[in-house]
Amino acid sequence: MTKFTYKDQTYIVKENFKSDSYFNYYKCQNSLSQDFVIIEKVNKPKLKAELNKLPISDIDQLLHDYIDCYQKEIEILKNTDHPNILKGFDFIEEKEQIILIKEFANMNLKNYIKNVKKKGLSTAEIRYIFFSIK
C-alpha cells in the first residue's frame, strides 16, 4: 500500500488515475478524515524538459511562472465556495516536484457530457444548470 505524507497528513493511494509526460494523478484517502482527494504530482525536471521544446530563451523564468500559476490555482480554489467547483487543499513545492491536493469528484465534466449525450437532460436539470451559473 502506497502512502504519501505531507504537512502531518497521510494519504493512502487508492488508485493511480493517469500519468502523462510530467503529471501523475492519484486518488487518495486522508487517513485521519477518511475524505478522498486527488493528488497531482508535477515532476519539475520533466516539466522543464517539455518547456525546453518551446522557442523561449528564459526557460527558468517560464518554469517559475508555471509554479506560480499552480500555487495561485490552489489559493483560488481554497477560497472558492461553490458546489460545482472543486476545493483546493494544499500546494507543496519540493526540489523535484510540485504537489497539488484537491477535492475528489466522482465525475469530471468530460464524462458528464458523454453521459448527457447518451440520455439527454430533463428540463429540470437544464434549469438547474443555467440558474446555478452566476
Image (tube, helix red, strand yellow):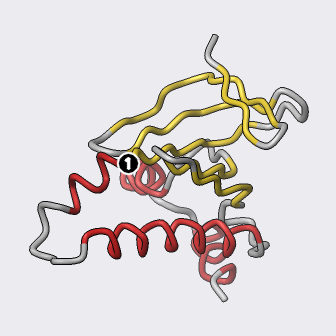
Judge from the rendering whether residue 104 lies leftward or rightward of residue 94; answer left or right: right
Image coordinates of residue 124 in percent, x first then y, are 65, 69
Q: Where is residue 41? Give x, y as percent.
A: 50, 43
State the residue in front, 108 or 9: 9
Tell me what residue is drawn at x 31 percent, y 53 percent: 47
Residue at 58% in and 70% down: 73
Kind of residue at disc 1: Lys
Pointer 1: what residue? 118
Q: Is residue 48 left or right of residue 1?
A: left
Report the side of 52 relative to 68 (left or right).
Answer: left
124 lies above or below 42: below
Q: Residue at point 84% right, 37% down? A: 8
Q: Position of residue 66 (x, y in %)?
A: 41, 69
| Residue in view at x 52 percent, y 73 percent | 68
Location of residue 133 by image quarter: bottom right
Q: Residue furthest top?
A: 1
